[in-house]
Image (spheres, rainbow, N blue to C red):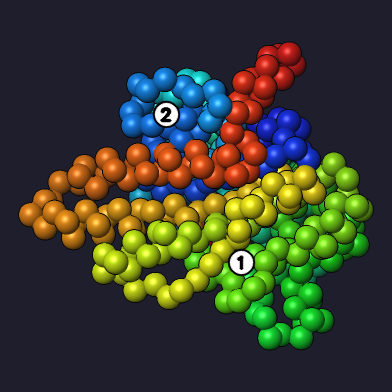
């Protein structure tokens, strides 16, 4: 069942984080739904209540243009049918104003992100405000972004480092003036596989400072992949050439959630699993050329990975409580 992002946030806020997973293709979609229902190897496996989690399926502009955005919508509608127990929201990731309007008008999306974080403060507010007005008319919520993610290096002077992070006072003003429903904040993470060169990590002091000024307001953490060493090693053992790297420690997800981080965005980790499984398959079965040969183990591994992530986010085991809360409202 597709629900609003707002409904999921109301249930999760301050208790656990909802995983927001990017998808591009069928195998990722099936693995994601199986993982969020605790199904191990096939669509017909029983639902595991202890593993079942609400989730957000998110679609980037790159995913929308990879084949045709209509394939994604059709695939998700079919998954909603096949996995009738699932409760999830559909979200546009890193939208431009144009992409946001397209998603709002489609009637398919639960929420959109307008990412004008590269613009000056007032322009970011004005752009976000326009999208909020169009979205709210249709009951769609809006995630905006304030601050600059990425490239936090250990040897940069403290002031310069902190200049990248979201300023708590500005966050309050931004949310008030733009009317956004959730805010992506720069708290030390960056996108992709190369996040931390040394001992950097999340800036919990900054998250706490923002939450203190904005209690109850859902914060979003982008760049949340943990870049597991196991998967990087498997890629490199099967012909890949990824340098040593690390991501957000999984043990940090739940403490961040307690401080108001309600949506945790994960894309890169899924890509690493895809890369490892496909490389290993073609290395180990050089005579095989069937797309289903790597596809089957990928879906199983991705489902197991999603179930694990949901445990770390605290969302595993929450699905029935969400269902009950939504039923009471209906
Ligand atoms: O934050 C960006 C996401 O990882 C999506 O990446 O634009 O390559 O699909 P993409
Ligand atoms: P990762 O690159 O850490 O997976 O972050 C994904 C993301 O923030 C999508 O918006
Ligand atoms: Zn992002």
Q: Is residue 109 left or right of residue 138?
A: left
Q: Is residue 279 above or below residue 39?
A: below
Tell whether circle 2 marks a residue whose Cβ is less than 8 angstroms from ligand 2: no
Which quarter of the figure has residue 201? bottom right
Which quarter of the figure has residue 52? top right
Q: Position of residue 10 (x, y in %)?
A: 76, 33
Q: Return the residue nearer the eye: 319 or 115.
A: 319
Q: Position of residue 238 (x, y in %)?
A: 26, 65
Residue located at (26% from left, 69% from top): 239
Q: Is residue 145 left or right of residue 50?
A: right
Q: Is residue 277 above or below residue 300?
A: below
Choose mark 2 or mark 1, whichever is in front. Answer: 2
Residue assigned mark 2: 39
Work out which residue is located at the far left of the displayed protein and give it: 287
Residue located at (73% from left, 46% from top): 257
Residue assigned mark 1: 190
For the N terminus, the quadrant is: top right
Residue located at (76% from left, 86% from top): 157
Q: Return the residue nearer the eye: 75 or 302.
A: 302
Tell whether circle 1 marks a residue whose Cβ is less than 8 angstroms from ligand 2: yes
For the C terminus, the quadrant is: top right
Q: Position of residue 189 (x, y in %)?
A: 65, 65
Q: Is residue 77 left or right of residue 182?
A: left
| Sequence-first tag of 2 and 1 | 2
Query: Which structural element holds mark 2?
Result: loop
């Amino acid at each position: 069942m597709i629900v609003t992002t707002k409904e999921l946030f109301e249930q999760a806020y301050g208790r656990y984080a909802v995983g927001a997973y990017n998808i591009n293709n069928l195998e990722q979609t099936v693995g994601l739904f199986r993982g969020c229902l605790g199904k191990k190897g096939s669509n017909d496996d029983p639902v595991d209540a202890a593993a079942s989690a609400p989730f957000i399926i998110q679609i980037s502009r790159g995913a929308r243009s990879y084949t045709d955005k209509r394939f994604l919508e059709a695939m998700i509608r079919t998954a909603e049918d096949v996995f009738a127990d699932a409760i999830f929201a559909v979200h546009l990731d890193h939208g431009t104003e144009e992409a946001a309007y397209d998603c709002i008008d489609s009637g398919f999306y639960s929420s959109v992100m307008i990412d004008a974080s590269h613009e000056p403060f007032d322009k970011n507010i004005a752009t976000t405000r326009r999208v909020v007005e169009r979205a709210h008319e249709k009951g769609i919520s809006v995630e905006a972004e304030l601050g600059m993610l990425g490239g936090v290096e250990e040897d940069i002077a403290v002031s310069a480092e902190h200049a990248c992070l979201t300023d708590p006072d500005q966050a309050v003003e931004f949310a008030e003036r733009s009317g956004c429903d959730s805010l992506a904040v720069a708290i030390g993470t960056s996108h992709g596989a190369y996040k931390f060169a040394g001992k950097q990590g999340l800036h919990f002091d900054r998250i706490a400072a923002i939450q203190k000024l904005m209690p109850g307001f859902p914060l979003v953490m982008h760049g949340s992949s943990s870049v597991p060493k196991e998967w990087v090693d498997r890629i490199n053992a099967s012909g890949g050439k990824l340098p040593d790297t690390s991501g957000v420690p999984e043990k940090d997800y739940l403490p961040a959630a307690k401080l108001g981080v309600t949506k945790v965005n994960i894309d890169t980790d899924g890509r690493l699993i895809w890369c490892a499984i496909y490389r290993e398959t073609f290395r180990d079965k050089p005579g095989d050329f069937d797309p289903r040969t790597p596809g089957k183990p990928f879906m199983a591994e991705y489902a197991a990975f999603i179930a694990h992530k949901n445990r770390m986010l605290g969302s595993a085991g929450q699905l029935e409580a969400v269902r009950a809360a939504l039923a009471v409202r209906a």
